[in-house]
Image (tube, rainbow, N blue to C red):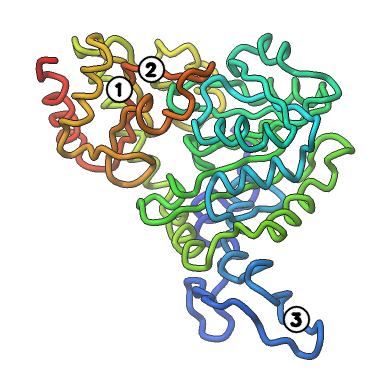
Amino acid sequence: MSQQQGPGFCTLAIHAGQEPDPATGAVVPPIYQVSTYKQDGIGGLRGGYEYSRSANPTRTALEECLAALEGGARGFAFASGLAGQDAVVRALTGPGDHVVVPTDAYGGTYRYVARVAGPQGLAHTAAAMSDLDAVRAAVRPGHTRLVWVETPSNPLLGIADIAALAELAHSAGALLVVDNTFATSYLQQPLALGADIVTHSTTKYAGGHSDVVGGAVVVAREVSGAAYADASERIAFHQNAIGAVAGPFDAWLVLRGLKTLAVRMERHCDNAERVAAFLAGHDAVAQVLYPGLSSHPGHPIAARQMRRFGGMVSFRLRRGEDAAVKAVATTRLWTLGESLGGVESLIEHPARMTHASVAGTALEVPADLVRLSVGIEDVEDLLADLGEALDIPG
């Protein structure tokens, strides 16, 4: 194993962008709940701050930390994950351009591409990101600007080869954008594998406590292609011009969450592995979708590009949609709700909840699918609750 270069992940999570306050020595960055800043004469800005839509010290601390954790050149914090994705698309594409999206993308991402960006002139093609030939066929040389991938994907836990997709995208003059929300920056480093841009819903594992909504974009140190050399500046311009920025308190909450991301993810992974094994042996379950299982078609790639396999598990029920709906409504510890990545365990029915917007499209998810966000509770309690729900006659 090669010697570690620079500080480790946990050290960066606690210290990057977070020097003790020079005025008081406070070890936690203050919440700069302020809209404007006194100027020392016209244009005489202290630290570059003039108005908090353009920049805020608490948000700056978060953005520096996000960039450090992803190994990128520059980070941006947004009001939501979709706000960050919107800034990327607006900054790097225009009318007549084309993007390739996953066939199992998050429903909100697909809704944005198809129903917001589409009417504004952006074309898209959905492709199975685990199939390089399918992605290659979907690319339109000269028109495709972005290849967009989630790995693991939401909600089918598909795995895509980031390094191979980066090479494919770059050969066509496109950029590779990786939604790293499920894996987190602790478990996976897309920029080190050749990706150009990483996005996150920081609402999820980065915040980690289901008490904040936010998004992040991190741009690589070297973005491929001369046409994208100013990708960071373009995204920065759109962040300011559109204004969907993270507020100071939201930025502070995400920054606090990042400090414990590594230790939380270890527990999420421990519990998810136990849950996946339990489900794989249950008579009511037809299929378990978890990249940590050797039966998962993407397991070898996930083992190569991820530290561990994450805290998300999906499964399909033999008795169909009615059984899935009954199961998600019956659990006690597993809370029925959308979102994911908090310390508490959540259960949902994607076809009727998070992915209802893709019904009737190529991205429609199976009606018998249940998605779990495995929390950090005592795993025996989680297994007992899940087992009771699955054993109820359907």
Which disc is residue 293 wearing?
Answer: 2
User: Which residue corresponds to the image point at 42% horizontal and 28% vertical from the top-left?
Assistant: 356
With respect to residue 150, does 18 lie above or below? Answer: below
As shown in the figure, which amino acid type bears the numbered disc 3? Leu
Mark 2 or 3: the one toward you: 3
Q: Secondary structure at mark 1?
A: helix
Q: Secondary structure at mark 2?
A: loop
N-terminal of the pair, mark 2 or mark 3, is 3
Quadrant location of the C terminus? top left
Query: Where in the figure is residue 35, as x and y percent of width and height?
Result: 59, 76
Whole-angstrom CA distance, mark 2 to mark 1, is 8 Å
Res 333 quadrant in image: top left
- Taking the image as shown, residue 369 lies to the left or right of residue 166, namely left
From the image, tell me which residue sits under label 3.
45
User: Which residue corresponds to the image point at 25% horizontal and 21% vertical from the top-left?
Assistant: 324
From the image, tell me which residue sits under label 1.
276
Q: Is label 1 in contact with label 3 (beta carbons under 8 Å)?
A: no
Labels in figure, total: 3
User: Which residue corresponds to the image point at 32% horizontal and 33% vertical from the top-left?
Assistant: 270
Q: Is label 2 in contact with label 1 (beta carbons under 8 Å)?
A: yes
Query: Where in the figure is residue 308, as x and y percent of width and height?
Result: 44, 31
